[in-house]
Amino acid sequence: MNSTELEGNWEEQKGKLKQKFAALTDNDLLFKEGMKDEMIGKLQIKLGKTKEELLKIIENL
């Protein structure tokens, strides 16, 4: 999934992620242009998932 695909429907995906992982906050899911890797890194730490696992979860929402 590239940044354009992620950015395109991020608000919808963000809501689904918050439903799936109750520990996530809006700050955890801030998506800023050029900051995708930083956000994914924060999610990796908070959820204990690999980058690949997280991208697959987001892709399958």
Image (cartoon, rainbow, N blue to C red):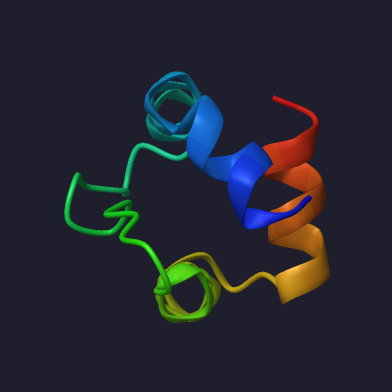
x, y (%) of residue 44? 55, 74
Observer-nearest of 35 and 47: 35
Residue 59, compared with residue 31, is above or below; it is: above
The answer to whether 41 appears left or right of 5 in the picture is left
Observer-nearest of 37 and 49: 37
x, y (%) of residue 5? 67, 39
Observer-nearest of 6 and 46: 6
State the count of labels.
0
Figure quadrant of residue 57: top right
x, y (%) of residue 22? 35, 37
Residue 26, compared with residue 10, is above or below; it is: below
Figure quadrant of residue 46: bottom left
Residue 49, compared with residue 28, is above or below; it is: below
Residue at image point 53% right, 30% down:
8
Residue at image point 77% right, 37% down:
59
Q: Quadrant of the C terminus?
A: top right
Residue at image point 59% right, 73% down:
48
x, y (%) of residue 6? 59, 42
The answer to whether 43 appears left or right of 15 in the picture is right
Residue at image point 43% right, 23% down:
19
The answer to whether 14 appears left or right of 2 in the picture is left
